[in-house]
Amino acid sequence: MADPRDETTAFTPKFGPDGLLPAIAVDAETGEVLMLAYMNEEALKRTLATGEVHYWSRSRAEIWHKGATSGNLQELAEILIDCDQDTLLLRVRQRGPACHTGRQSCFYRKLVTDDPESKELNGTVQLRFMDVE
Amino acid sequence: MADPRDETTAFTPKFGPDGLLPAIAVDAETGEVLMLAYMNEEALKRTLATGEVHYWSRSRAEIWHKGATSGNLQELAEILIDCDQDTLLLRVRQRGPACHTGRQSCFYRKLVTDDPESKELNGTVQLRFMDVE
C-alpha cells in the first residue's frame, strides 16, 4: 500500500487509462457534495488558469466549461487531491444550481434501505427523493 | 440532457464499461468527504446485505471489505445516487481513520494555487499538507 505519492508534496496526478481523473465538487462554504465529473489534463489546466471549473464531458467527448451556457459556473476555491493522487476534490463557489435538473446537488435521491426486501438488489430496490433542507 | 434516470424512483445504477461505479464516502455526521473508491454490482450487493461498505479493489482485482483487516470499517448509514445514476454517495459511520495513511480523510493535501506560477501545471505545481482541524 506504500506509494511514494502518499507523502510527496509534488503534484503528480494519476490519470486513468482513459486519461481521466474523477473530480468531486463540494460547496466551499457548506461542504455539501454537489456532483462528480471527470477532468483530463487539459480541463485541469484550464481550471487552474481561469479559476473556473472545466471538466471533460464523456458523453460529448469535449472540454466542458461548467456553466458556460447555463450560467451556473463553478468558481474554484481550492483543489485537494487524495493519497494516491487519482481523485480530486474541488471546493467551489457554485453559482446557481450544480445539477442540470435545477437542483442544488446532483445527489437528491437515496436508496430505501430500511426495507429488508430492498437489500437483495433484485429489482425491488427503490429510490426516494430526499427532503431538501 | 433529459435522461429517464433523472426523475425515476427505480434504482438503475449505470455501471461503467469496466463494470464499476465511483462511490464517494462521506462522514454521516459531519459530511466530510473521506475517500472515493469503486463498486461493482457484487460489492454493492454485499454492502446492502451486510450494512458494511464493500468496494472493488482495482489494484488487487477483488472485493474489498473496507476495514476487514485494519478494523477501520465503514458502517453504512445511507446511499444516495446522482441524477444520471452513475455515481454513489455513501454516508458512513467511519470507525477509525478512512485513509490507509492513518489520516481521517484521504484528502489531506491541497494545491498551492495562490502562486501565479502554479497555474500553468508545468511541473512547478506543489502540494501543501492541509491543517487538520
Image (cartoon, coloured by chain):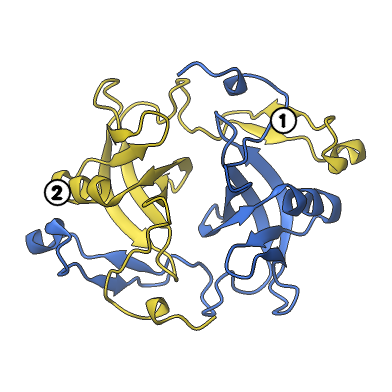
Chain colours: A blue, B yellow
Instruction: Provide residue A129's location: percent of width, then percent of height.
Output: 33, 74
Q: Which residue is mark 2?
A: B49
Left or right of B77 in this view: A109: right
The residue positioned 26% from the left and 21% from the top of the image is B69
Instruction: Provide residue B26's location: percent of width, then percent of height.
Output: 42, 46
The residue positioned 61% from the left and 48% from the top of the image is A20
| The quadrant where residue A62 appears | bottom right
Instruction: Provide residue B129's location: percent of width, then percent of height.
Output: 66, 26
Left or right of A31 in this view: B88: left
The residue positioned 35% from the left and 70% from the top of the image is A130
B114 relative to B124, above or below: below
Q: Amino acid at mark 2?
A: Ala
Q: Amino acid at mark 1?
A: Phe
Q: Which residue is mark 1?
A: A11
B122 relative to B22, above or below: above
Instruction: Provide residue A1's location: percent of width, then percent of height.
Output: 45, 19
